[in-house]
Amino acid sequence: MKYYKTTVSIMLGVLGVVLSAFNNIIGIPTGFGMTVDLAAVPVLVAAFVLGARYGVYALNVLFLGILFTSPTGFIGGTMKFIATAPLIFVPYFMNRGLLRGFAFSIAILIALFSLPALAFTFNQFLGALLFLLAVVLIAYSTGEDRISPSLFGFVLAVVVRCIITVITNIYFAGPLFFKMSPDELIAFVESIGLPFAKSSVYAIISFWNIIQSIVEWSIAYYISFYRLKHKY
């Protein structure tokens, strides 16, 4: 059964890579490098149906697929992992207590990101290797309990996601992708604004990540709990 779940999670991760490849067709571009797409939906289905560990396995495959097939490469793969991981980690670690789960989820994501990001600025191959090693170790240490589908867990996960993505977009992904300083990037993003208003860089990045989270979570929830009839 374990090998079956691993195989299914890998297949779901590959499906996420395929969806990522078509994000220009079925995605919504935000203007600052992020595209609201469906790539993480299969990953969340794996976490809902098979368990947190297999969701992370699928997310690892998605990261590798973006790393080797997308023009955004390591930056795109890292940001997709960083943005999606809270939707798995937070509901999973909340089983150990609300405050502890919240703090541990933020700490593990910062640790997961910081060293590879630093290495990447000097050596891209080393940065990618360190990041991959980190996510493999985290996947191996994560249990097989399914993530909680509760609304509160989702809201808390989105809060963590917004915190992490604001920091990583301003100080890592944006400057590297657009070759700008953080201050130049902030001015650029704020010049884009939101669909209905101008706003701060924090609100703009958070808004699109909230939209992305709602799309991913709702579709994955529907598939996992209303369409799939398998019992594990």
Image: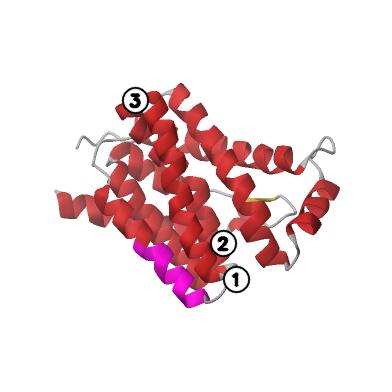
Task: Give the CA distance from mark 2 to mark 1.
Answer: 8 Å
Would you name the residue on which mark 2 appears?
Answer: 76
Task: Give the CA distance from mark 1 to mark 3.
Answer: 40 Å
The residue tagged with tag 2: helix, strand or loop? helix
Q: Nearer the viewer, residue 170 or 91?
A: 170
Residue 51 placement, left or right of 152 = left
User: Residue 198 at what x, y percent from top left?
Assistant: 85, 39
Q: Amino acid at mark 2?
A: Gly
User: Residue 207 at what x, y percent from top left?
Assistant: 68, 37
Q: Nearer the viewer, residue 92 or 222?
A: 92
Comes first in the chain, label 2 or label 1? 1
Contact? badges 1 and 3 (CB < 8 Å): no
Would you name the residue on which mark 1 appears?
Answer: 71
Q: In the image, what residue occupies the spot 39% across and 38% down?
A: 104
**Where is residue 51, by image quadrant?**
top left
122 in magenta: no
Q: Which residues are magenta?
A: 124-133
Name the colour scheme. Answer: secondary structure
Q: Amino acid at mark 3?
A: Gly
- Within 10 Å of disc 3 (Cα), the crowding (few <14, some 14-19, many 20+) is few
